[in-house]
Amino acid sequence: MTEVKKMPLSKRGDMTVGNPFKVIILFALPILLGNLFQQFYNLADMRISGETLGEDALAAISATGSIYGVIIGMANGMNNGSAIVVTRLFGAKNMERMRKAVAHMLLINLATAAVFTALGLLLLDSLMSLIDVPETLYGEAYSYISIIIGGIITTILYNMGASVLRAVGDSRTPLVFLIFTSLLNVGLDLFFVKGLGMNVGGIALATVCAQAVSVVLVFSYIWKKRPELHVKKGDFRLEAPLFSELALMGLSMGLISSLVSLGSFALQRAINGFDKATITATGAARRLDGLFMLPLSTLGTAAATFVGQNYGAKRYERITSGIKSTLIAGSLWSALGVAVIYLFGAELAEMLTASTDEQIISEAVMYMRINLPFFFVLNLLFVFRSALQGLGKKAVPIVSGAIELVLKFVAATLFAPYLGYIGICIAEPVIWVVSAVVVTAVFAVDLRKLRLEQEAL
Protein backbone atom coordinates (compact mmCIF):
# COMPACT_ATOMS: atom_id res chain seq x y z
CA MET A 1 0.00 0.00 0.00
CA THR A 2 1.27 3.46 -0.89
CA GLU A 3 2.31 5.42 2.18
CA VAL A 4 0.30 8.58 2.68
CA LYS A 5 2.64 11.53 2.95
CA LYS A 6 1.20 14.12 5.28
CA MET A 7 1.71 17.70 4.20
CA PRO A 8 0.04 20.84 5.47
CA LEU A 9 -2.58 22.32 3.20
CA SER A 10 -2.96 26.05 2.81
CA LYS A 11 -6.35 27.36 3.82
CA ARG A 12 -6.87 28.47 0.25
CA GLY A 13 -8.06 25.41 -1.60
CA ASP A 14 -9.00 23.30 1.40
CA MET A 15 -12.76 22.80 1.12
CA THR A 16 -12.95 20.49 4.13
CA VAL A 17 -13.15 23.44 6.54
CA GLY A 18 -15.18 26.64 6.73
CA ASN A 19 -18.79 27.54 6.01
CA PRO A 20 -19.90 25.28 3.11
CA PHE A 21 -21.98 27.97 1.34
CA LYS A 22 -19.19 30.53 1.51
CA VAL A 23 -16.53 28.00 0.50
CA ILE A 24 -18.51 26.81 -2.52
CA ILE A 25 -19.48 30.30 -3.73
CA LEU A 26 -15.94 31.67 -3.36
CA PHE A 27 -14.61 28.66 -5.24
CA ALA A 28 -17.30 28.81 -7.93
CA LEU A 29 -17.15 32.54 -8.70
CA PRO A 30 -13.72 32.52 -10.40
CA ILE A 31 -14.70 29.40 -12.35
CA LEU A 32 -17.90 31.08 -13.45
CA LEU A 33 -16.11 34.22 -14.58
CA GLY A 34 -13.57 32.06 -16.37
CA ASN A 35 -16.30 30.07 -18.11
CA LEU A 36 -18.01 33.30 -19.09
CA PHE A 37 -14.86 34.54 -20.74
CA GLN A 38 -14.41 31.15 -22.42
CA GLN A 39 -17.93 31.52 -23.79
CA PHE A 40 -16.92 34.98 -24.85
CA TYR A 41 -14.76 33.28 -27.50
CA ASN A 42 -17.88 31.86 -29.13
CA LEU A 43 -20.06 34.93 -28.65
CA ALA A 44 -17.38 37.17 -30.12
CA ASP A 45 -17.06 34.79 -33.07
CA MET A 46 -20.80 35.06 -33.74
CA ARG A 47 -21.00 38.83 -33.32
CA ILE A 48 -17.98 39.60 -35.51
CA SER A 49 -19.06 37.03 -38.11
CA GLY A 50 -22.58 38.42 -38.32
CA GLU A 51 -21.46 42.04 -38.38
CA THR A 52 -18.48 41.66 -40.73
CA LEU A 53 -19.07 38.57 -42.86
CA GLY A 54 -22.87 38.43 -42.98
CA GLU A 55 -25.62 35.98 -42.04
CA ASP A 56 -24.26 33.12 -44.20
CA ALA A 57 -21.06 33.07 -42.12
CA LEU A 58 -23.14 33.20 -38.93
CA ALA A 59 -25.28 30.26 -40.07
CA ALA A 60 -22.16 28.31 -41.12
CA ILE A 61 -20.70 28.56 -37.59
CA SER A 62 -24.06 27.63 -36.04
CA ALA A 63 -24.49 24.61 -38.33
CA THR A 64 -21.37 22.84 -37.02
CA GLY A 65 -21.77 23.58 -33.32
CA SER A 66 -22.75 20.02 -32.45
CA ILE A 67 -19.58 18.55 -34.02
CA TYR A 68 -17.35 20.70 -31.87
CA GLY A 69 -19.57 19.98 -28.88
CA VAL A 70 -19.10 16.21 -29.13
CA ILE A 71 -15.32 16.38 -29.44
CA ILE A 72 -14.65 19.04 -26.85
CA GLY A 73 -17.30 17.65 -24.51
CA MET A 74 -15.55 14.29 -24.44
CA ALA A 75 -12.08 15.80 -24.03
CA ASN A 76 -13.01 18.31 -21.32
CA GLY A 77 -15.22 15.79 -19.55
CA MET A 78 -12.27 13.41 -19.33
CA ASN A 79 -10.18 16.16 -17.69
CA ASN A 80 -12.88 17.05 -15.21
CA GLY A 81 -13.37 13.40 -14.31
CA SER A 82 -9.67 12.67 -13.89
CA ALA A 83 -9.31 15.82 -11.79
CA ILE A 84 -11.79 14.38 -9.28
CA VAL A 85 -9.18 11.71 -8.50
CA VAL A 86 -6.65 14.51 -7.91
CA THR A 87 -9.22 16.28 -5.73
CA ARG A 88 -9.75 13.25 -3.49
CA LEU A 89 -5.98 12.72 -3.12
CA PHE A 90 -5.60 16.39 -2.23
CA GLY A 91 -8.36 16.09 0.36
CA ALA A 92 -6.65 13.00 1.80
CA LYS A 93 -3.31 14.92 1.78
CA ASN A 94 -1.60 12.20 -0.26
CA MET A 95 0.62 14.58 -2.25
CA GLU A 96 3.02 12.01 -3.67
CA ARG A 97 0.28 10.03 -5.31
CA MET A 98 -1.46 13.23 -6.38
CA ARG A 99 1.60 14.19 -8.44
CA LYS A 100 1.63 10.77 -10.06
CA ALA A 101 -2.01 11.27 -10.95
CA VAL A 102 -1.18 14.60 -12.61
CA ALA A 103 1.59 12.96 -14.66
CA HIS A 104 -0.76 10.20 -15.77
CA MET A 105 -3.36 12.84 -16.69
CA LEU A 106 -0.86 14.50 -19.01
CA LEU A 107 -0.19 11.22 -20.81
CA ILE A 108 -3.91 10.59 -21.20
CA ASN A 109 -4.46 14.10 -22.55
CA LEU A 110 -1.70 13.93 -25.14
CA ALA A 111 -3.05 10.62 -26.42
CA THR A 112 -6.61 11.99 -26.44
CA ALA A 113 -5.56 15.07 -28.40
CA ALA A 114 -3.79 12.97 -31.03
CA VAL A 115 -6.74 10.61 -31.47
CA PHE A 116 -9.40 13.33 -31.55
CA THR A 117 -7.49 15.47 -34.03
CA ALA A 118 -6.82 12.58 -36.40
CA LEU A 119 -10.31 11.08 -36.25
CA GLY A 120 -12.02 14.48 -36.28
CA LEU A 121 -10.31 15.59 -39.49
CA LEU A 122 -10.57 12.15 -41.11
CA LEU A 123 -14.30 11.84 -40.44
CA LEU A 124 -15.25 15.49 -40.81
CA ASP A 125 -16.99 15.11 -44.17
CA SER A 126 -19.04 12.21 -42.82
CA LEU A 127 -19.93 14.13 -39.67
CA MET A 128 -21.08 17.14 -41.65
CA SER A 129 -23.18 14.91 -43.87
CA LEU A 130 -24.62 13.23 -40.78
CA ILE A 131 -25.99 16.52 -39.45
CA ASP A 132 -27.10 17.56 -42.95
CA VAL A 133 -25.20 20.85 -43.24
CA PRO A 134 -26.86 22.79 -46.09
CA GLU A 135 -24.85 22.78 -49.33
CA THR A 136 -24.89 26.58 -49.48
CA LEU A 137 -23.11 26.73 -46.10
CA TYR A 138 -20.83 23.71 -46.54
CA GLY A 139 -17.64 25.47 -47.66
CA GLU A 140 -17.53 28.06 -44.91
CA ALA A 141 -18.70 25.57 -42.28
CA TYR A 142 -15.91 23.14 -43.24
CA SER A 143 -13.32 25.94 -43.15
CA TYR A 144 -14.36 26.92 -39.63
CA ILE A 145 -14.70 23.53 -37.96
CA SER A 146 -11.61 21.95 -39.57
CA ILE A 147 -9.35 24.64 -38.08
CA ILE A 148 -11.04 24.29 -34.67
CA ILE A 149 -10.49 20.51 -34.71
CA GLY A 150 -6.92 20.91 -35.94
CA GLY A 151 -6.15 23.02 -32.88
CA ILE A 152 -8.08 20.90 -30.40
CA ILE A 153 -4.89 20.10 -28.47
CA THR A 154 -4.76 23.69 -27.21
CA THR A 155 -8.23 23.42 -25.67
CA ILE A 156 -7.50 20.00 -24.17
CA LEU A 157 -4.21 21.02 -22.54
CA TYR A 158 -5.55 24.30 -21.18
CA ASN A 159 -8.52 22.53 -19.62
CA MET A 160 -6.19 19.97 -18.08
CA GLY A 161 -4.10 22.67 -16.43
CA ALA A 162 -7.18 24.54 -15.25
CA SER A 163 -8.80 21.33 -13.95
CA VAL A 164 -5.70 20.42 -11.93
CA LEU A 165 -5.52 23.88 -10.38
CA ARG A 166 -9.21 23.74 -9.48
CA ALA A 167 -8.71 20.26 -8.00
CA VAL A 168 -6.33 21.76 -5.44
CA GLY A 169 -8.70 24.64 -4.77
CA ASP A 170 -7.22 27.33 -7.02
CA SER A 171 -10.04 28.59 -9.20
CA ARG A 172 -8.73 32.15 -9.46
CA THR A 173 -5.61 31.72 -11.56
CA PRO A 174 -7.37 30.12 -14.57
CA LEU A 175 -9.76 33.09 -14.50
CA VAL A 176 -6.93 35.60 -14.92
CA PHE A 177 -5.58 33.71 -17.91
CA LEU A 178 -9.01 33.40 -19.53
CA ILE A 179 -9.70 37.12 -19.19
CA PHE A 180 -6.47 37.90 -20.98
CA THR A 181 -6.88 35.32 -23.74
CA SER A 182 -10.55 36.21 -24.30
CA LEU A 183 -9.59 39.79 -25.00
CA LEU A 184 -6.76 38.50 -27.17
CA ASN A 185 -9.26 36.35 -29.09
CA VAL A 186 -11.39 39.40 -29.95
CA GLY A 187 -8.33 41.31 -31.11
CA LEU A 188 -7.21 38.40 -33.29
CA ASP A 189 -10.75 38.02 -34.69
CA LEU A 190 -10.64 41.61 -35.88
CA PHE A 191 -7.06 41.30 -37.16
CA PHE A 192 -7.65 38.13 -39.20
CA VAL A 193 -11.07 39.15 -40.57
CA LYS A 194 -10.85 42.91 -41.00
CA GLY A 195 -7.09 43.28 -41.24
CA LEU A 196 -6.22 40.28 -43.41
CA GLY A 197 -9.61 39.85 -45.10
CA MET A 198 -10.05 36.22 -44.03
CA ASN A 199 -13.47 34.50 -43.83
CA VAL A 200 -14.79 32.32 -41.00
CA GLY A 201 -11.49 30.42 -41.12
CA GLY A 202 -9.91 33.54 -39.61
CA ILE A 203 -12.44 33.44 -36.78
CA ALA A 204 -11.47 29.84 -36.01
CA LEU A 205 -7.75 30.58 -36.27
CA ALA A 206 -8.09 33.43 -33.79
CA THR A 207 -9.70 31.09 -31.28
CA VAL A 208 -6.97 28.44 -31.64
CA CYS A 209 -4.18 31.02 -31.28
CA ALA A 210 -5.75 32.53 -28.16
CA GLN A 211 -6.18 29.07 -26.61
CA ALA A 212 -2.53 28.24 -27.38
CA VAL A 213 -1.48 31.29 -25.38
CA SER A 214 -3.65 30.11 -22.47
CA VAL A 215 -1.82 26.75 -22.48
CA VAL A 216 1.56 28.46 -22.15
CA LEU A 217 0.27 30.65 -19.33
CA VAL A 218 -1.32 27.91 -17.23
CA PHE A 219 1.60 25.48 -17.41
CA SER A 220 4.14 28.25 -16.80
CA TYR A 221 2.21 29.23 -13.67
CA ILE A 222 2.12 25.65 -12.40
CA TRP A 223 5.86 25.32 -12.95
CA LYS A 224 6.74 28.60 -11.23
CA LYS A 225 4.15 28.87 -8.45
CA ARG A 226 2.78 25.43 -7.58
CA PRO A 227 5.67 23.16 -6.51
CA GLU A 228 3.25 20.63 -5.02
CA LEU A 229 2.17 19.86 -8.60
CA HIS A 230 5.68 19.42 -10.01
CA VAL A 231 5.99 15.95 -11.51
CA LYS A 232 9.19 13.97 -11.83
CA LYS A 233 10.31 11.49 -14.45
CA GLY A 234 9.37 8.59 -12.21
CA ASP A 235 5.79 9.88 -11.92
CA PHE A 236 5.25 9.01 -15.59
CA ARG A 237 5.98 5.33 -14.95
CA LEU A 238 2.59 3.77 -15.52
CA GLU A 239 0.79 2.31 -12.52
CA ALA A 240 -2.10 0.23 -13.75
CA PRO A 241 -4.48 0.85 -10.78
CA LEU A 242 -3.97 4.62 -10.84
CA PHE A 243 -4.13 4.81 -14.63
CA SER A 244 -7.33 2.76 -14.63
CA GLU A 245 -8.93 4.94 -11.96
CA LEU A 246 -8.08 8.13 -13.85
CA ALA A 247 -9.18 6.69 -17.18
CA LEU A 248 -12.46 5.32 -15.81
CA MET A 249 -13.37 8.52 -13.98
CA GLY A 250 -12.39 10.56 -17.02
CA LEU A 251 -14.26 8.26 -19.35
CA SER A 252 -17.32 8.47 -17.11
CA MET A 253 -17.55 12.26 -17.29
CA GLY A 254 -16.33 12.35 -20.87
CA LEU A 255 -19.04 9.95 -21.96
CA ILE A 256 -21.65 12.03 -20.17
CA SER A 257 -20.57 15.15 -22.04
CA SER A 258 -20.12 13.44 -25.38
CA LEU A 259 -23.34 11.43 -25.14
CA VAL A 260 -25.25 14.62 -24.43
CA SER A 261 -23.47 16.36 -27.31
CA LEU A 262 -23.90 13.35 -29.58
CA GLY A 263 -27.61 13.59 -29.00
CA SER A 264 -27.28 17.18 -30.17
CA PHE A 265 -26.24 15.75 -33.55
CA ALA A 266 -29.79 14.52 -33.99
CA LEU A 267 -31.25 17.85 -32.89
CA GLN A 268 -28.80 19.76 -35.10
CA ARG A 269 -29.80 17.62 -38.07
CA ALA A 270 -33.45 18.44 -37.39
CA ILE A 271 -32.59 22.14 -37.02
CA ASN A 272 -30.59 22.13 -40.26
CA GLY A 273 -33.73 20.91 -42.03
CA PHE A 274 -35.34 24.31 -41.43
CA ASP A 275 -34.52 27.49 -43.34
CA LYS A 276 -31.38 29.59 -42.84
CA ALA A 277 -33.11 32.08 -40.55
CA THR A 278 -34.22 29.30 -38.19
CA ILE A 279 -30.72 27.77 -38.17
CA THR A 280 -29.29 31.17 -37.20
CA ALA A 281 -32.02 31.82 -34.60
CA THR A 282 -31.54 28.46 -32.91
CA GLY A 283 -27.75 28.78 -32.95
CA ALA A 284 -27.99 32.18 -31.29
CA ALA A 285 -30.58 31.01 -28.75
CA ARG A 286 -28.55 27.95 -27.79
CA ARG A 287 -25.46 30.07 -27.26
CA LEU A 288 -27.37 32.50 -25.07
CA ASP A 289 -28.91 29.54 -23.25
CA GLY A 290 -25.39 28.22 -22.75
CA LEU A 291 -24.36 31.53 -21.29
CA PHE A 292 -27.19 31.46 -18.74
CA MET A 293 -26.49 27.78 -18.10
CA LEU A 294 -22.87 28.44 -17.11
CA PRO A 295 -23.54 29.35 -13.45
CA LEU A 296 -25.45 26.07 -13.04
CA SER A 297 -22.72 23.95 -14.63
CA THR A 298 -20.13 25.89 -12.62
CA LEU A 299 -21.97 25.13 -9.39
CA GLY A 300 -21.95 21.50 -10.48
CA THR A 301 -18.17 21.66 -10.90
CA ALA A 302 -17.84 23.25 -7.47
CA ALA A 303 -20.09 20.56 -5.98
CA ALA A 304 -17.94 17.79 -7.48
CA THR A 305 -14.77 19.34 -6.01
CA PHE A 306 -16.40 20.02 -2.64
CA VAL A 307 -17.85 16.51 -2.38
CA GLY A 308 -14.61 14.93 -3.62
CA GLN A 309 -12.41 16.69 -1.07
CA ASN A 310 -14.76 16.02 1.85
CA TYR A 311 -15.28 12.42 0.78
CA GLY A 312 -11.50 11.97 0.66
CA ALA A 313 -11.22 13.56 4.12
CA LYS A 314 -14.19 11.50 5.39
CA ARG A 315 -16.07 14.67 6.31
CA TYR A 316 -19.40 13.22 5.26
CA GLU A 317 -21.52 15.56 7.34
CA ARG A 318 -20.32 18.50 5.24
CA ILE A 319 -21.46 16.92 1.98
CA THR A 320 -25.17 17.40 2.77
CA SER A 321 -24.66 21.04 3.78
CA GLY A 322 -22.65 21.71 0.65
CA ILE A 323 -25.28 20.20 -1.65
CA LYS A 324 -28.07 22.25 -0.03
CA SER A 325 -26.02 25.44 -0.43
CA THR A 326 -25.35 24.67 -4.09
CA LEU A 327 -29.01 23.99 -4.85
CA ILE A 328 -30.08 27.27 -3.23
CA ALA A 329 -27.55 29.27 -5.24
CA GLY A 330 -28.61 27.55 -8.48
CA SER A 331 -32.29 28.22 -7.85
CA LEU A 332 -31.65 31.92 -7.24
CA TRP A 333 -29.72 32.16 -10.50
CA SER A 334 -32.43 30.31 -12.43
CA ALA A 335 -35.03 32.81 -11.23
CA LEU A 336 -32.85 35.71 -12.34
CA GLY A 337 -32.22 34.09 -15.75
CA VAL A 338 -35.95 33.64 -16.40
CA ALA A 339 -36.60 37.28 -15.57
CA VAL A 340 -33.83 38.55 -17.84
CA ILE A 341 -34.89 36.45 -20.83
CA TYR A 342 -38.56 37.39 -20.55
CA LEU A 343 -37.71 41.08 -20.23
CA PHE A 344 -34.72 41.47 -22.54
CA GLY A 345 -34.58 38.32 -24.70
CA ALA A 346 -35.16 40.16 -27.98
CA GLU A 347 -32.47 42.73 -27.26
CA LEU A 348 -29.96 40.00 -26.37
CA ALA A 349 -30.71 38.04 -29.56
CA GLU A 350 -30.35 41.14 -31.72
CA MET A 351 -27.12 42.14 -29.98
CA LEU A 352 -25.58 38.69 -30.49
CA THR A 353 -26.55 38.17 -34.13
CA ALA A 354 -26.24 41.80 -35.32
CA SER A 355 -29.44 41.03 -37.21
CA THR A 356 -32.78 42.82 -37.38
CA ASP A 357 -34.56 39.95 -39.16
CA GLU A 358 -37.86 39.54 -37.31
CA GLN A 359 -37.94 35.74 -37.83
CA ILE A 360 -34.47 35.28 -36.38
CA ILE A 361 -35.21 37.40 -33.32
CA SER A 362 -38.70 36.00 -32.62
CA GLU A 363 -37.64 32.35 -32.97
CA ALA A 364 -34.57 32.88 -30.80
CA VAL A 365 -36.74 34.46 -28.09
CA MET A 366 -39.29 31.63 -28.31
CA TYR A 367 -36.57 29.03 -27.81
CA MET A 368 -35.14 30.80 -24.76
CA ARG A 369 -38.49 31.52 -23.12
CA ILE A 370 -39.40 27.84 -23.27
CA ASN A 371 -36.00 26.58 -22.06
CA LEU A 372 -35.11 28.98 -19.23
CA PRO A 373 -37.98 28.10 -16.83
CA PHE A 374 -36.72 24.51 -16.82
CA PHE A 375 -33.35 25.61 -15.47
CA PHE A 376 -34.71 24.89 -12.00
CA VAL A 377 -34.83 21.22 -13.04
CA LEU A 378 -31.47 21.44 -14.80
CA ASN A 379 -29.99 22.73 -11.54
CA LEU A 380 -30.97 19.47 -9.81
CA LEU A 381 -29.49 17.44 -12.65
CA PHE A 382 -26.15 19.24 -12.63
CA VAL A 383 -25.69 19.27 -8.85
CA PHE A 384 -26.69 15.68 -8.11
CA ARG A 385 -24.85 14.26 -11.11
CA SER A 386 -21.68 16.15 -10.15
CA ALA A 387 -22.03 15.06 -6.52
CA LEU A 388 -22.22 11.43 -7.61
CA GLN A 389 -19.02 11.93 -9.61
CA GLY A 390 -17.38 13.49 -6.57
CA LEU A 391 -18.25 10.32 -4.65
CA GLY A 392 -16.51 8.28 -7.35
CA LYS A 393 -19.72 6.89 -8.85
CA LYS A 394 -19.29 6.14 -12.55
CA ALA A 395 -22.25 4.13 -13.77
CA VAL A 396 -25.25 6.31 -12.92
CA PRO A 397 -23.94 9.54 -14.51
CA ILE A 398 -23.19 7.55 -17.68
CA VAL A 399 -26.70 6.07 -17.63
CA SER A 400 -28.05 9.61 -17.23
CA GLY A 401 -26.06 10.72 -20.27
CA ALA A 402 -27.29 7.71 -22.25
CA ILE A 403 -30.88 8.60 -21.38
CA GLU A 404 -30.29 12.13 -22.72
CA LEU A 405 -28.78 10.67 -25.90
CA VAL A 406 -31.74 8.38 -26.57
CA LEU A 407 -34.30 11.06 -25.77
CA LYS A 408 -32.63 13.56 -28.09
CA PHE A 409 -32.86 11.10 -30.95
CA VAL A 410 -36.50 10.48 -30.06
CA ALA A 411 -37.15 14.21 -29.89
CA ALA A 412 -35.50 14.80 -33.26
CA THR A 413 -37.48 11.94 -34.79
CA LEU A 414 -40.88 12.77 -33.32
CA PHE A 415 -41.01 16.33 -32.01
CA ALA A 416 -39.58 18.26 -34.96
CA PRO A 417 -41.46 16.47 -37.79
CA TYR A 418 -44.83 16.62 -36.03
CA LEU A 419 -44.58 19.81 -33.98
CA GLY A 420 -42.25 21.87 -36.15
CA TYR A 421 -39.98 24.43 -34.51
CA ILE A 422 -41.85 24.23 -31.21
CA GLY A 423 -40.74 20.58 -31.06
CA ILE A 424 -37.11 21.70 -31.14
CA CYS A 425 -37.81 24.20 -28.37
CA ILE A 426 -39.35 21.69 -25.96
CA ALA A 427 -36.96 18.81 -26.64
CA GLU A 428 -34.28 19.54 -24.05
CA PRO A 429 -36.63 20.56 -21.22
CA VAL A 430 -38.38 17.18 -21.50
CA ILE A 431 -35.00 15.44 -21.42
CA TRP A 432 -33.82 17.39 -18.36
CA VAL A 433 -36.89 16.38 -16.38
CA VAL A 434 -36.43 12.66 -17.04
CA SER A 435 -32.67 12.71 -16.34
CA ALA A 436 -33.08 14.77 -13.16
CA VAL A 437 -35.53 12.27 -11.71
CA VAL A 438 -33.00 9.45 -12.22
CA VAL A 439 -29.95 11.14 -10.67
CA THR A 440 -31.91 12.68 -7.78
CA ALA A 441 -33.28 9.29 -6.76
CA VAL A 442 -29.84 7.64 -6.91
CA PHE A 443 -28.15 10.43 -4.97
CA ALA A 444 -30.79 10.19 -2.23
CA VAL A 445 -29.94 6.50 -1.78
CA ASP A 446 -26.19 7.16 -1.70
CA LEU A 447 -26.61 10.02 0.75
CA ARG A 448 -28.45 7.72 3.12
CA LYS A 449 -25.56 5.25 2.92
CA LEU A 450 -23.07 8.01 3.74
CA ARG A 451 -25.10 9.03 6.78
CA LEU A 452 -25.12 5.47 8.05
CA GLU A 453 -21.36 5.25 7.47
CA GLN A 454 -20.86 8.53 9.32
CA GLU A 455 -22.83 7.23 12.30
CA ALA A 456 -20.63 4.15 12.37
CA LEU A 457 -17.40 6.16 12.57
Image (spheres, helix red, strand yellow):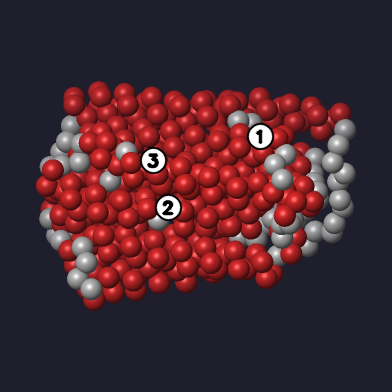
User: Which amino acid type is marked by label 3?
Assistant: Leu
Left or right: residue 156 compared with residue 44: right
**In the picture, residue 457 is in which quadrant?**
top right
Indicate the secondary structure of the residue bearing disc 1. helix
Left or right: residue 109 compared with residue 313: left
Residue to which mark 1 is pinned: 244
Q: Residue 179: x percent and y percent?
A: 47, 69
Nearer the camera: disc 2 or disc 3: 3
User: Which amino acid type is marked by label 1?
Assistant: Ser
**In the picture, residue 352 is in which quadrant?**
bottom left
- In space, the residues marked 3 and 1 are separated at their CA atoms by 23 Å
Indicate the secondary structure of the residue bearing disc 2. helix
Query: Residue at 24% across / 60% down in the picture?
Result: 200
- In space, the residues marked 2 and 1 are separated at their CA atoms by 24 Å
Query: Residue at 33% across / 41% down in the picture?
Result: 122
- In space, the residues marked 2 and 3 are separated at their CA atoms by 12 Å
Instruction: Mark 2 or mark 1: name the one nearer the start of the chain.
Output: 2
Left or right: residue 308 compared with residue 94: left
Indicate the secondary structure of the residue bearing disc 3. helix
Residue to which mark 2 is pinned: 152
Q: Residue 401: x percent and y percent?
A: 47, 31
Left or right: residue 415 compared with residue 448: left
Query: Residue at 61% across / 34% down in the picture?
Result: 248
Query: Residue at 31% across / 35% down in the picture?
Result: 265
Instruction: Mark 2 or mark 3: name the one nearer the start of the chain.
Output: 3
Residue to which mark 3 is pinned: 119
User: Which amino acid type is marked by label 2?
Assistant: Ile
**In the picture, residue 353 is in which quadrant?**
bottom left
Dot 2 crowding, Cα within 10 Å, few <14, some 14–19, many 20+ = many
